[in-house]
Image (cartoon, rainbow, N blue to C red):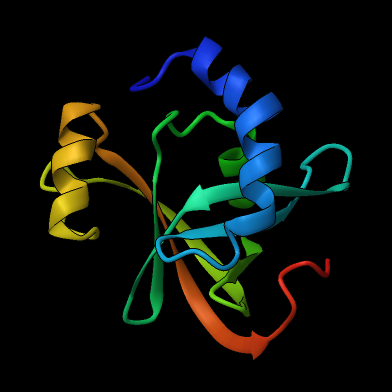
């Protein structure tokens, strides 16, 4: 895994709570709304996201075994709040890409330094205007 469990735990408890308020409005960020695969409960997870044509690309900085990734793969769909829009995403696919071609050039360097080669891609079904604070 590129980043350790301790960093992931800290981010989930501290960073995600703070970032969750501004991520839906910041370039390169968003909040994923996904359903728990066992509980059915709706969860929100701040993420880095890059929109490429009709695809959303997520760099898996904590690997593909994180709960939010596993939830999306199990459900086959999720929603993304980004730049003031709510996007319906489907067709999740794990991609191993050592060239990191789905992200901007300056991000490729950072991901290479962090040894991140795995991505989750989802198809954007349709954008709808929404208030990112609303769930």
* Picture quadrant of residue 27: bottom left
Kindly tell me whether residue 75 is visible in this rendering.
Answer: no
Which is nearer the eye, 27 or 120?
A: 27
Q: Residue 44: x, y in percent?
A: 72, 50
In this rendering, would 125 be left or right of 104?
A: right
Q: Residue 31: x, y in percent?
A: 62, 57
Image quarter (top left, top right, bottom left or bottom right) of the N terminus: top left
Which is nearer the eye, 80 or 35?
A: 80
Which is nearer the eye, 115 or 15?
A: 15
Image quarter (top left, top right, bottom left or bottom right) of the C terminus: bottom right
Identified at 89% across, 39% down, the residue is: 39
* Picture quadrant of residue 75: bottom right
Looking at the picture, does residue 49 appear above or below residue 133? Answer: above
Identified at 62% across, 18% down, the residue is: 9
Identified at 75% across, 78% down, the residue is: 131
Q: Residue 46: x, y in percent?
A: 60, 48
Q: Residue 92: x, y in percent?
A: 49, 59
Which is nearer the eye, 3 or 10?
A: 10
Kindly tell me whether residue 5 is visible in this rendering.
Answer: yes
Looking at the picture, does residue 114 appear above or below residue 127? Answer: above
In this rendering, would 42 be left or right of 82?
A: right
In this rendering, would 40 be left or right of 84?
A: right
* Picture quadrant of residue 109: top left
In this rendering, would 122 be left or right of 111?
A: right
Looking at the picture, does residue 129 appear above or below residue 51? Answer: below
């Amino acid at each position: 895994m590129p980043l350790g469990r301790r960093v992931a735990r800290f981010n989930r408890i501290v960073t995600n709570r703070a970032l969750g308020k501004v991520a839906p409005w910041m370039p390169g960020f968003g909040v994923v709304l996904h359903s728990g695969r066992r509980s059915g409960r709706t969860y929100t997870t701040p993420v880095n996201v890059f929109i490429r044509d009709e695809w959303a690309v997520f760099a898996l900085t904590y690997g593909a075994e994180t709960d939010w990734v596993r939830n999306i793969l199990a459900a086959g769909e999720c929603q993304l709040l980004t730049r003031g829009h709510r996007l319906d995403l489907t067709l999740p696919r794990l991609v191993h890409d050592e060239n990191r071609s789905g992200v901007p050039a300056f991000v490729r360097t950072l991901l290479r330094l962090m040894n991140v080669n795995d991505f989750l891609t989802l198809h954007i079904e349709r954008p709808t205007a929404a208030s990112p604070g609303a769930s």
